[in-house]
Image (tube, grey):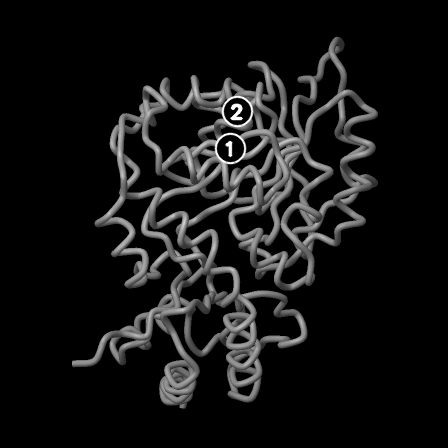
Amino acid sequence: MSAPIDLRSDTVTRPTPAMRRAMAEAEVGDDVYAEDPTINRLESRAAEIFEREAALFVPSGSMGNLLAIWCWTDRGQEVICDARSHTYIHEMGAMSAIAGVMPRTIPTPDGILSWDLIAPLVHGSGGYYSPTGLIELESTHNLAGGTVYPPATIGDIADRTHAAGLKIHLDGARIFNAAAALGKSVADITRPVDSVMFCLSKGLGAPVGSMLVGSRDFIAKARMRRKILGGGMRQAGVLAAAGLIALEDSPKGLPHDHENARFLAAGLAKIPGIQVDPAQVATNIVMFDVDRRITAAAFCDALRSRGVLCSAFGPQLVRMVTHYDVDRPAIERALDLVRAVLS
């Protein structure tokens, strides 16, 4: 039986042969003592690419986001974020459970905040309100369908955030996808914010790990708190070696993933019973509705039985994500099977 066509997420990518070779040959040391040379190279290279002072290798993007929130805020403060942000929806309430802060959410149709939306929710100390501690943005925005922040919008929010004496963190799990869509460098589009988390293990294809970048003092604090969370790793250069390959080689293939996503969306739009606007597909995430003859869960189950994996994100909402392990013929086959299910 052939392998399933896995469109659930770009987290399912498998390490490339080059990554496997690098992992097998990695020079290692004890990272808790900052003696793993491969991790040190990865952190140095990530900082260089983002034009920051320092970077930190963490096991997951959720840990990276939590560390940023924890380092920038004090207990009892609020974090302003989009109502469908990953930090709010998909990180197990960690900002409250561990950092001791509360999310202050703003609903948006496309996951893109503006200062006009943020400003009414910013509170200082005193009175009856929890003070604002941090502004958090997400680009690309997962649940909004891979939407990308315009650089001018990030710049405006950052300028006003800093004028208010606050910090701004960017959940850039798929920031290289955003850069590919904008035709700009990750350094250029993230320069206004104070910290960035990005994943090596999504579209970039590494098996494990994310990076947190920022100032030297910020990263030193995050490193200490990573240890508190149990994130101190020993000979993890075997993981960092794959991350280095992902950082250097994988961004080149992201435009192809985006082309496949647009092809997928255009094909879905022609199938009766599916509602999707291909013009809204900005990167590698395709969100679409199935009509009420079938639920999203039943649709995904029916496709799974035929060898296509995707995810239900609501009663009628389905997500498919393209990545380098799914080529154009596989997408064409997936479209054929979607037609079969809905016929």
Reply above or below: 31 against 263.
Answer: above
Residue 150: % across, % down: 74, 54
The three-letter code of the residue at mark 2 reads: Ile
Tag 1, which secondary structure? Answer: strand
Q: Residue at x 26, y 49 (%)?
A: 23
Q: Quadrant of the C terminus?
A: bottom left
- Is 170 drawn above or below residue 317 in the view shown? above
Residue located beneath label 2 in the image: 219
Residue 270 picture quarter: bottom right
Quadrant in which residue 226 is drawn = top left
Q: Residues within 10 Å of mark 1 (few under 14, many from 20)?
A: many
Q: Residues within 10 Å of mark 2 (few under 14, many from 20)?
A: many
Horizontal side, residue 239 vs residue 267: left or right? left
Residue 161, how many percent across, how many down? 77, 30
Q: Position of residue 41 (x, y in %)?
A: 42, 38
Name the N-terminal-most of marks 2 and 1.
1
- The kind of residue tagged 1 is Ala
In the rendered structure, the answer to whether residue 17 lies left or right of residue 56 reads left
From the image, which quarter does the N terminus lie in? bottom left
Q: Considering depth in this image, is 261 or 265 the residue closer to the camera?
A: 261
* In contact (CB < 8 Å): disc 2 and disc 1: yes
The dot on residue 55 is 1
Instruction: Compare residues 131 and 151 and report the one nearer the observer.
Output: 151
In the rendered image, which quarter is residue 28 located in?
A: top left
Using residue 175 as the reference point, say whether residue 93 is left or right of it: left
**Where in the figure is residue 288, as x and y percent of width and height?**
53, 71
Query: In the image, is 61 to the left or to the right of 275?
Result: left
Q: Which mark is residue 195?
A: none
Q: Secondary structure at mark 2?
A: helix
